[in-house]
Every structure is written in C-alpha cells, then in structure tokens.
C-alpha cells in the first residue's frame, strides 16, 4: 500500500465512522417511546395479584416491574376522564379501595368508549410505580401508555 | 352505658366530619422544568398521575409523585432524567408534606380564588429540604383547585448536572403544580 492509498483508506474509514455515529446519534435523539401495541408484556396477571405483590414487597416489586410492559386483567371500577382529556381506567375489585390505575396512551384514547364500568378487561401498559395507602385513599399501582385489550 | 354511647357517638361524628373536610386527587398534574435560555430545546416533563390530599380543617397538604411517571417529548430525555438525574430506580417517589399557613383565610364553602402560602418539607432523590411556595387555591363548585409554582435548587437534593451540559440544564428546577381535588368519600 502506498502512502496515498493508506491515507485514502484512513479517510474513508473515518468518514464512515462519523456518518454512522451521526446517524445513530440522530436516531437516538429522535427516538420515540415504546410502541405499546406491539410490545410484549413481560408479566401477565390479575390486577389484584399485582397490587398484592406491591403491597407485600414494594422494593422487590419496583425492581421487577418498574418501566416494564405489564398486562393485567380485572374489572373496570371507574373511568376517570380528567379535563385534559387523557382518560384513566381504574381496574380492581369493587370491595377493595386499592386499584390499578391505567393511564391510556394518547394514540388510543378513543378506545375508552368501547368499555364500560363492571366489564372485565385486559390492559397492557408500562408500570411507573406504586402509591401505598398512606393518605387513607387506597393504594394504587400506576400504569401509563396503556392500551385496552378486551377479553 | 349512656356515657359510653355518647363517647362512641361523638367519636363517630368527629370521624365523619373529618372525612368531609378532606379533598384529594390521583390525577394531579405536576410539571418539572429545567429549561434555561441556553437549552437547545425545552427540558420539561409532565406527570399526570400525582396524588394530592388536602385537609381543609388543618390546612395540611400532601403530594406524592412517582418519578417514572414524568413524561418527556423525547424518550432519550426521559431516560436521562430517570437514570442520571432523578435515579428513579433508587428513589421512585417524591413527597411533599406541608401546611397552608393562611388556611384560616380560605373559605372552602364559598367559590373564589384565595392566595395561599404553603410551607413544608420536600423529599426528592432521598433528600429532605424545607420548602416554601406561593400559589392559589380556587374553590369552584365544591372542588378545590390547587395551583402553585416553586423552585427547587437541584444541588440541595444532591442531583448533579454533568459539566458537559452544565450551561444547558437549569440548576434550579421550576416545579408547577396544577391539581383539581374532589371531596373525599363521594
């Protein structure tokens, strides 16, 4: 290899690295959130069992479920539409104060009209944590970016 | 026997009247804003699932926010917020416990806008600091609207901004609170 060839190869490699690096950075920068409809739930269970898991051992459950895609089944207790129009489906047992609060993904808010209180549904979403009942208003597990998957 | 009944009765009365004086929400909105003029874009996240409880009798007010519940426009920003700054896996919750100093001046049964001064303790990133905030309590049709804005110096909460972005991320975060509270037990 002559000096010129060496120089050209080096320039070529460096340019490729820079372009790939730039592309990667651009993609990362503009990355959108998880596509919940096609995401696979790592955990599927009833709402009651999820609440029990958090009530029993919040720390361990945080490690297990935080930021993970979870699917739960249960009865619709209430549908909470706040003034900004992003509805929350409250799933759980009527006899209990505790529930799983499922904040619908903004792309799927229309699906709220397909469900009604008392119906058994299954919901997929990302777990953001647990609010223990320190305030006397029931404990809650919070899921965001939820989509409703009817049973 | 009569005495006992009276005591039990009085006890029940206090409980029920206490219940009526409390207001709460589980869908409170809290915005965390660390934008500075030099930021290339807005650095702010919104949490729409904050819990807030207010006791109109004592003026006690409490907020509970899950850090992972903050949503940012960019996923990368959200990850940085959770992993590098708030360390949400280690400290999943932010709690504020305080009291409305001028609670006596607020008439919870009459519609209107009342300026409110709140003092209390904010626990974020595992650190607890005294906090003062001014805002408004609006009474409207039996609901209590709480709105406030205050600043939190991130260093106080041991949240460090890496040198490389030091001039692009605010050292003092603006926190905006916007909650609509319903009476408890309805």
Image (cartoon, coloured by chain):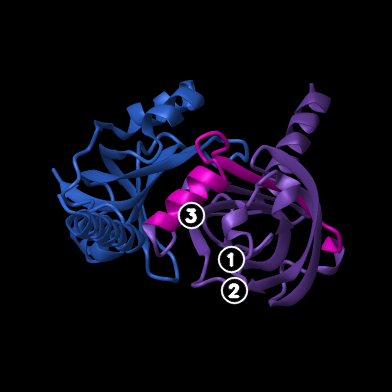
Chain letter, disc 1 residue: B
Which residue is drawn at the image coordinates 54% and 53% (left, top)?
A: B50
Could you tell me which secondary element the residue under label 1 belongs to?
A: loop
Please indicate whether residue A130 sits to the left or right of residue A107 in the image. right
Q: Quadrant of residue A31?
A: bottom left
Nearer-N-terminus badge (1/2): 2
What range of the chain is rendered magenta?
A: B76-103
Q: Secondary structure at mark 3?
A: loop
Q: Would residue A133 be found to the left or right of residue A99 on screen?
A: right
- Is A132 on the left or on the right of B53, as rendered? left
Q: Is residue A103 above or below residue B90?
A: below
Mark 3, residue position: B70
The chain carrying label 3 is: B
Q: Position of residue B130 (x, y in %)?
A: 82, 49
Please name the residue that numbered disc 1 is placed on: B168
Residue B184 appears in the picture as rendered: yes
Chain shaded blue: A
């Amino acid at each position: 290899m002559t000096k010129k060839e060496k120089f050209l190869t080096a320039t070529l490699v460096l340019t490729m690295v820079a372009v790939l690096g730039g592309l990667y950075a651009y993609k990362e920068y503009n990355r959108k959130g998880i596509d919940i409809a096609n995401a696979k739930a790592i955990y599927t269970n009833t709402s009651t069992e999820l609440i029990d898991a958090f009530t029993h051992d919040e720390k361990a459950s945080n490690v297990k479920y935080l930021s993970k895609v979870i699917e739960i089944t249960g009865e619709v207790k209430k549908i909470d539409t706040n003034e900004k129009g992003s509805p929350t489906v409250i799933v759980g047992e009527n006899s209990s104060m505790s529930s799983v609060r499922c904040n619908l993904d903004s792309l799927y808010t229309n699906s709220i009209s397909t469900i009604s209180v008392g119906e058994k549904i299954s919901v997929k979403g990302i777990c953001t944590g647990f609010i223990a009942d320190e305030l006397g208003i029931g404990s809650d597990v919070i899921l965001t970016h939820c989509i409703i998957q009817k049973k | 026997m009569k005495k006992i009944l009276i005591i039990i009765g009085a006890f029940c009365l206090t409980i029920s009247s206490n219940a009526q004086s409390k207001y709460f929400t589980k869908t409170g909105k809290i915005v965390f804003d660390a934008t500075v003029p030099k930021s290339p874009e807005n650095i702010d996240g919104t949490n729409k699932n904050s819990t807030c409880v207010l006791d109109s009798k004592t003026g006690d007010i409490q907020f509970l926010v899950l850090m992972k519940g903050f949503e940012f426009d960019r996923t990368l920003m959200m990850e940085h917020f959770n992993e590098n700054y708030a360390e949400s896996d280690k400290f999943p919750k932010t709690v504020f416990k305080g009291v409305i100093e001028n609670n006596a001046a607020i008439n919870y049964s009459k519609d209107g806008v009342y300026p409110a001064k709140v003092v209390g303790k904010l626990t974020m990133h595992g650190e607890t600091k005294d906090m003062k905030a001014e805002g408004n309590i609006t009474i409207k049709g039996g609901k209590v609207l709480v709105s406030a804005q205050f600043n939190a110096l991130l260093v106080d909460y041991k949240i460090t901004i890496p040198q490389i972005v030091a001039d692009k991320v605010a050292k003092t975060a603006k926190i905006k609170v916007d909650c609509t509270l319903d009476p408890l037990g309805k």
